[in-house]
Amino acid sequence: MEPPKPQIPNYITPEGHQRLWQEHSHLVKRERPRVVQEVAEAAAQGDRSENAEYIYGKKRLREIDRRVRFLEQRLDAAQIVDPRQQTRRDRVFFGATVQVEDEAGERKTWMIVGEDETDAGTGRISHRSPIGQALLGKGLDDEIKVRTPGGERLYVVAGIAYA
């Protein structure tokens, strides 16, 4: 038997951790019982092989169970990192909100978060992403080079803040 693989820490902000727990709770306490009830009602109608409600309900239960297992694994591996407790605020660490300027003078703002919290549309990028990794440990006016699908980009750290 193979030894268990070591889990890579799942760094997450307190807000991200709360969102995962809320989703888990919603699935376990509300969604799954509702679907179980629907499947039971569909099963009571008779022939299950041609019962679309029954077949769809069973499929939905498998999807819910798969998502619940995934959330439980992520929550078990979670290490909550509160950016407000960061004492060294002159460098980019997990939870920092970083403003960068590119070569054209365009500014972008990103928050460095965990993998389960990323949302490019709102500027929340993973600490494991190429940009996130390049920013970690940098200070004001430091330059970073990042390889993007559009080619290599150069950024200068213009601001660092911790919520």
Image (cartoon, helix red, strand yellow):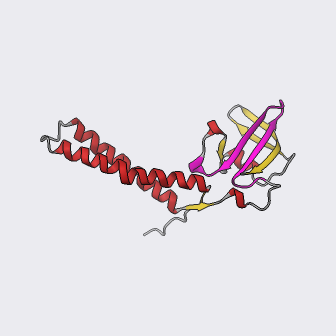
Say if residue 5 shows up in the picture.
yes
- Residue at 73 percent across and 40 percent down: it is 109
| Image label count | 0
Q: Quadrant of the N terminus?
A: bottom left
Visible residue check, residue 8: no
Q: Which residue corresponds to the image point at 79% horizontal and 48% vertical from the top-left? A: 160
Above or below for 68 versus 60 = below
> Percent position (x, y) of residue 89?
80, 56
- The image shows residue 83 at horizontal and vertical percentages of 69, 56
Query: Percent from the top left, x then y, of residue 73?
Result: 48, 59
Residue 110 shown in magenta:
yes
Q: What residue is shown at x 33% (from left), y 50% (from top)?
A: 32
| Residue found at the far left of this picture | 46
Q: Quadrant of residue 157?
A: top right
Nearer to me, 98 or 66: 98
**Horizontally, is 51 left or right of 28 in the view?**
left
Judged left or right of residue 72, residue 34 is left
Q: Residue at x 54, y 62 (%)?
A: 77
Nearest the camera: 21 or 63? Answer: 21
Residue 128 horizontal side relative to residue 78, left or right: right
Left or right, 111 with respect to 49, comes to: right
| Above or below, comparing residue 53 to residue 20 in the picture | above
Magenta highlight on residue 88: no
**Residue reaching furthest to the right:** 141
Q: Which residues are magenta?
A: 92-117
Quadrant of res 158: top right
